Amino acid sequence: MLTYEDCLAMTDLTEEEVEAIAEHEHCPEMRALEVGHYLVQAPDGRPRIRRMIVEDIAMARARGNVRHAEKLNLVLQRFCDKYPEAREGDQA
């Protein structure tokens, strides 16, 4: 039986990126892992993940949760460093 950690290791995502997707999609982390794995491979998926994280940052700021917004900013920075093409075609 595969564990969450096994599945995470088979993706190109970090645990923090999966958590951001789960937060955005209001779903369990295992489902977010599946969505993220699909999106990382989809032609327009990486910019979509970037937008999810950007929207999560905006929501954290709107709630006054500065610490969480800062954490998500780091997740976003690392994601865009890993996938510079995530910025391409993004209207956010």
Image: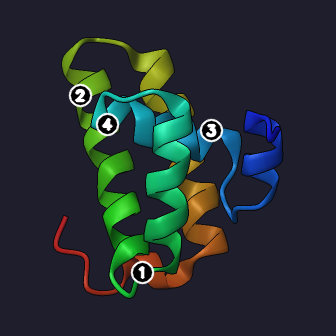
Whether residue 27 is situated above or below residue 64 in the rendered picture: below
Q: Mark 4 points at which residue?
A: 24
Whether residue 59 is situated above or below residue 36 in the rendered picture: above
Nearer the camera: disc 1 or disc 2: 1
Q: Which circle's residue, 3 or 1, is located before the other in the chain?
A: 3
Which type of secondary structure does the marked residue at label 4 adopt?
helix
* Residue 79 point in image, percent of width and height: 58, 61
* Residue 36 point in image, percent of width and height: 49, 57
Q: Which circle's residue, 2 or 4, is located before the other in the chain?
A: 4
Q: Distance between the residues labelled 1 and 4?
A: 18 Å
Left or right of 6, for residue 24: left
Q: Do the residues labelled 3 and 2 touch (CB within 8 Å)?
A: no
Nearer the camera: disc 1 or disc 4: 1
Q: Distance between the residues labelled 3 and 4?
A: 12 Å
Which type of secondary structure does the marked residue at label 1 adopt?
loop
Q: Which circle's residue, 3 or 2, is located before the other in the chain?
A: 3
Q: How far apart are marks 2 and 4 (CA)?
A: 9 Å
Q: Which circle's residue, 1 or 4, is located before the other in the chain?
A: 4
Which type of secondary structure does the marked residue at label 3 adopt?
helix
Q: What amino acid type is highlighted by mark number 3? A: Glu
Quadrant housing the C terminus:
bottom left
Q: Are marks 1 and 4 in contact (CB under 8 Å)?
A: no
* Residue 73 point in image, percent of width and height: 49, 42
Label 1 crowd bin: few (<14), some (14–19), many (20+), radius 10 Å:
few
Q: Name the residue under label 1.
A: 42
Tag of residue 16: 3
Q: Name the residue under label 2.
A: 59
**Going 56% across and 56% down the picture, which residue do you hit?**
77
Nearer the camera: disc 3 or disc 1: 1
